[in-house]
Amino acid sequence: MTTTTSKPSGAEATETAPRTYLNYIAGEWRPSASGETFDDTNPARRSEIVARFQKSTPADVDAAVRAAEAALPAWRALPAPARGEIMLRAALILERERDRLARQMTREMGKPLKETQGDLQTAIDFGKYTAGEGRRAEGETVPSALADKLCLTLRQPVGVVGIITPWNFPMAIPAWKTFPALLAGNTVVLKPASDTPLSAAALVEVLIEAGLPAGVLNFVTGPGGTLGDTLVTHPSVNMISLTGSTEVGRHVAELCGRDLRRCSLELGGKNAVIVMDDANLDEAVAAVAWAGFGTTGQRCTATSRVIVHERVAEAFAEKLVATAEKLRIGDGLLPETEMGPLVNQGRVGAVHEYTEIGTSEGAALLTGGKPLTAGALAEGAFYAPTVFTNVTTDMRIAQEEVFGPFVSIIPVADYDDAIRAANATMYGLSCAIFTENARTVFRAMRDIQSGLIYINAGTTGAEPHLPFGGMKASGNGHRELGHKAVEEFSEIKTVFVSYPPVK
C-alpha cells in the first residue's frame, strides 16, 4: 500500500489572509483593466488560498507590450556586461531567499520541498551562468577571401519578447527564459501559468530589487487562451518563447507563422527508459521511480515508458511496483513526503482517464490507478503512483503524454526491438538506456531519436551550461540553456568591412 502523510502543524498550517498581487507594467504594480481577480490555491488543500492575482484582459497585455517597446532603446544600449551584473544580483537574491521561496512554491504547486529547492537552485545557477554570458564574445571575426577586407558577425537583440511559461517548474522555466532574453538586450512581457503565478511574481520582485529598469520586464496574469493569443499576435512583439503542450505549441506556431514572428517552442514528451538484460536493475528501478513519480510525473522529461528486455521484464516490474507502493504521499511541506499532489483536481481526472484507457486496451494494471482521497489526502489532488505492464507500442498509453505518476512497461526481445519501441512516438525529448555494454551505449547514442540522452540514469535532469530541447514534436528545433540560450534571443548581423588603399 502507498503510504500517506498528514497535514503540517504549527506555523506552516496557519492560514493568513492571502495577498492580492497586481500586474507589473512600466515599472508600476497595477490592477487589471477588468477589476477582477482569481485565486491561486494549494493543490494539497483546495480550501487554502495561497494568493490572489489579476484576471487580466487583452488591454493589459497591450499596455505591457507598449511599456516593453518604450523601454527597449535604453535597455539595448546598456552594455551587455552591465546587463549581466543585474542578472548576477538577481541570482544572489534568489540564493538568499531560496528556502522561503521554495516553501512558497510548494504551497502553490505541491511538489515536495527538496524538489522546489531544486527548482530554485536551477534558477540561481542559470542566473549566475547567464551573467557571465554578458562578457562572452558576441560574434566572430573571420578572414575574407578578398584582400583588404574584414568579415565579422554581431549579435543584437530581437526586440520585445513574449514569454509564456508552464506550472510544473514555476521558477526555473521563467528564469531560464527571462534571464537570457534580458541579457541579450530584449525587453520582456512575462505571462505565467494561472496555476502557479506566485513563483513568477517572486522572480519579477527579485529582478526589480536587482535594479532592472522600469518597463524592461512586464508581468501579466490571467487566462492562458485569451492572453496568450493576444500576446502571440501583437504586432509589436518580435518573438514568442513558450513551454507547453505540443497541442498548444502547434497553435502558437501557426499564429506566429502568419506574421513570420520568431517562436521558440519547448513542448511535450513521451520519454522512455530502455533497460537491457545486462542492466543493474536496482539502479534502473531507482532512476525510473524518481523520473516517473518525481514532481508527480508532471515534467516534460518524466519517464512515461520503460522498454525492458523480456528476460528481466518481470523482475524489473516487481521491483518498480514495490518501490511505487512504498512512496510516502502527502503535503509537500512535510519532510517525509516523497510525492505531492497533482497541480489541480482537473489533472486527477485526466490521469485517471488514462488508467481507464490502459485497462480497456488490454494492458495489465500492476499498482495504483486511482485517486487518493482518504484521511489527510481528502482535500487534495492526489493520485496513486501507477504502473502498467504488457503494454504495446500502438496503445494510447504508450503514445500520448499523460503528465502524471503513470509508467507503462513495454517488454521487448532485443536491442533493435528496444530502439524501434523508443522511437515509435511523435515525441523526441528525452530518452535513457541502462546497460553495462559500451558498444550498446554508443549505438544507442546514435540510434535514439531524442534531444536529450541519458546513459545509466533517468530521463530527467538538466545542467545550466548545456543545451536543452527536443526533436520531432517535442519542439521546433530551438534549444534553451547553455550559450545557445542567449543566441536564441538574438539576431545575427554579418558585417563586411573593406579598406582598400586610397589611389
Image (cartoon, grey):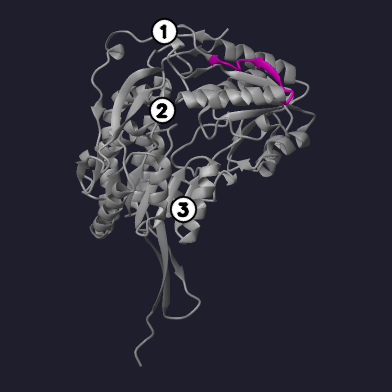
Q: In the rendering, which numbered label is found on residue 263?
A: 3
User: As rendered, which of 305 and 218 lies closer to the eye?
Assistant: 218
Q: Nearer the viewer, mark 2 or mark 1?
A: 1
Is 369 contained in the magenta span? yes
Q: Is residue 154 above or below residue 195?
A: below
What residue did someone put label 2 on? Answer: 118
Mark 2 surroundings within 10 Å by alpha-carbon count, few (fewer than 14), some (14 through 19), many (20 or more): some
Q: Which residues are magenta?
A: 361-371
| Amino acid on which the number 1 mark rests in the picture | Ser
Q: Earlier in the sequence, mark 3 or mark 1?
A: 1
What residue did someone put label 1 on? Answer: 6
| Amino acid on which the number 2 mark rests in the picture | Gly
Name the element at disc 1: loop
Q: Is residue 37 above or below residue 68?
A: above
Tell me the distance, in whole angstroms, between the alpha carbons under discs 2 and 1.
Answer: 23 Å
User: As rendered, which of 191 and 467 lies closer to the eye?
Assistant: 191
Tell me the distance, in whole angstroms, between the alpha carbons under discs 2 and 3.
Answer: 28 Å
Q: Is residue 376 above or below residue 283?
A: above
Is residue 134 in view?
A: no
Q: Earlier in the sequence, mark 2 or mark 3?
A: 2
